[in-house]
Amino acid sequence: MNADTTTRRRPRCLPSVTTKLSTELGSLYITVGLDEDGQPFEVFGSLGKAGSLQHGMTEMACRLVSLHLRRGTPLVEMIGQIQGISEMQPWPNRMEDGSTVYVRGLGDAIALVLRDYLATQQEDAEPAELPIAAD
């Protein structure tokens, strides 16, 4: 499926959900803004101090994911491309359901949050197995 070449305009106000994850570089906050249908529309993230490499890379990654969301790239396709990207030591995170997941990098963390969203949207509570992008 090809992404639409039209970027949807951002409404003035959007509801959002923020997730805090632990990484070896500190706390990573990922906020997912939802459109009028309750679907992910944009992603914001915060890691590190303003002006730091981590902060800049987080902002860049979130802007690119947001652009794809606003152009209609399927969520499963985006998750498949960014999950498993590893640039830091795996860091354990206790999830709301009591399970422990390991964040291995910024892309992996964004994919985790988006995958969690998909799991809550499915009628059965089982998260879908998503492909990991080939190197």
Image (cartoon, rainbow, N blue to C red):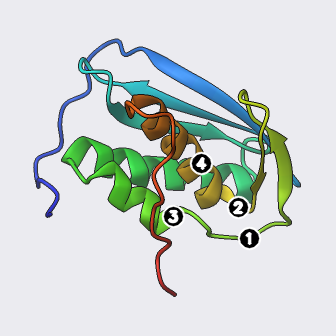
Q: Decide which of tag 3 and tag 2 comes sooner along the chain.
A: 3
User: x%, y% of residue 37?
Assistant: 24, 21
Contact, mark 3 vs mark 2 (Cβ under 8 Å): no
- Residue bearing the label numbered 3: 82
Report, in whole angstroms, how far the alpha carbon at label 4 lies from the one at label 1. 15 Å
The x, y position of residue 98, in whole percent, is: 79, 32
Instruction: Name the residue rendered at 31%, 45% in the picture.
Output: 69
User: Mark 2 — residue?
Assistant: 105
Any part of residue 105 in sight: yes
The numbered disc on residue 53 is none
Q: Secondary structure at mark 3?
A: helix
Q: Residue at x 43, y 39 (%)?
A: 118
Q: Compare residues 80 and 96 and report the one nearer the observer.
A: 96
The quadrant holding residue 107 is: bottom right
Nearer to us of marks 4 and 2 is 4
What's the distance in space between the residues labelled 3 and 2, CA to CA?
10 Å
* Label 1 – label 2 distance at C-alpha: 5 Å
Distance in Å between CA atoms under marks 4 and 2: 10 Å
Return the x and y of residue 44 as percentages of the image width and height: 53, 36
Which of pointers 4 and 1 indicates the residue nearer the eye?
4
Return the mark for residue 112: 4
Secondary structure found at label 1:
loop
The label on residue 87 is: 1
Q: Nearer the viewer, residue 42 or 57?
A: 42
Q: Is residue 88 left or right of residue 60?
A: right
Measure the C-alpha gap from mark 3 to mark 1.
12 Å
Return the disc, 3 or 1, that comes first in the chain's sequence.
Answer: 3
Q: Position of residue 13 (x, y in %)?
A: 35, 12
Which residue is nearer to you in this view: 98 or 39? Answer: 98
